[in-house]
Amino acid sequence: MRMFGAVFVLLVLMLAGCSEGPDGAPIGDGSAGESSGGQGASGETTAVQAMELRTVTIAASGGEKVDVRVEIADTPAEQQRGLMGRTALGEDRGMLFVFHGEQTLSFWMKDTLIPLSIAYLDSEGRIVDIQDMKALDDDPPHYISAEPAKYALEVNKGFFDERVVEVGDRAELPE
């Protein structure tokens, strides 16, 4: 009987790992990064994750306030996983990577299926660099911040251009 219980629990965990959220994005996946970071962002997938989504508000150069609903990646495991394997990302969704102190950050796109844009932010929330990243690009050199940064914000490729978000703009970051 104990064997049946263990097999049942394992089966449930495996099925949960294969689940998709309402936007078609798999639940619990991301992308990979080097020692300093990773990639990622996602749409709302479950009620639990919906509660975990936070808002980053950017005061864009175009004069608009730009809200991005983000998942937070603040552990090495979350940062390494990022958006790896996801097939979709909601329109105003992203992933915010939070590091300990400002440093040069390096991201890659290993096993990341969707093209992304990344904004590097300093400890004050000022955008110090923006780069576009190609899907499945794991060839060096990777996407390295132009200046030391404490945060990295990943969104769909073109998100920042479409909303006139530029280097020097400031973001209000979740606490």
Image: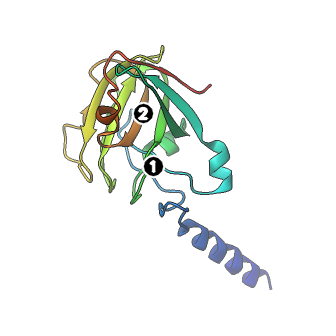
Callout count: 2
Compared across the picture, whether 93 is left or right of 129 comes to right
For numbered disc 1, what is the local secondary structure?
helix
Is tag 1's residue or tag 2's residue first in the polypeptide sequence?
1
On screen, 137 above or below 140? below
Give the CA separation, mark 1 to mark 2. Answer: 14 Å
Tell me the quadrant of the picture where the N terminus can be found: bottom right
Q: Nearest to the eye among marks 1 and 2: give it.
A: 2
Say what amino acid the circle numbered 2 marks. Leu
Compared across the picture, whether 33 is left or right of 99 comes to left
Q: Position of residue 62 (x, y in %)?
A: 35, 22
Q: Nearer the viewer, residue 135 or 11?
A: 135
Q: Nearer the viewer, residue 50 or 152?
A: 50
Circle 2 residues within 10 Å: few <14, some 14–19, many ≥20: many
Compared across the picture, whether 108 is left or right of 78 comes to left
On screen, 72 above or below 23? above
Say what amino acid the circle numbered 1 marks. Arg
Circle 1 residues within 10 Å: few <14, some 14–19, many ≥20: many
Residue at the far right: name it: 1
Task: Determine which residue is flagged by label 1.
Answer: 81
Specify how the rendered protein is coloured. rainbow
Q: Position of residue 42 (x, y in %)?
A: 48, 49
On screen, 43 above or below 147? below
Task: Determine which residue is flagged by label 2.
Answer: 153
Tell me the quadrant of the picture where the C terminus can be found: top right
Q: Nearer the viewer, residue 106 or 42?
A: 42
For numbered disc 2, what is the local secondary structure?
strand
Q: At 38% across and 36% down in the image, what residue appears? A: 35
Q: Position of residue 162 (x, y in %)?
A: 31, 36
Q: Which mark is residue 147?
A: none
Residue at the far front: name it: 63
On screen, 7 above or below 31? below
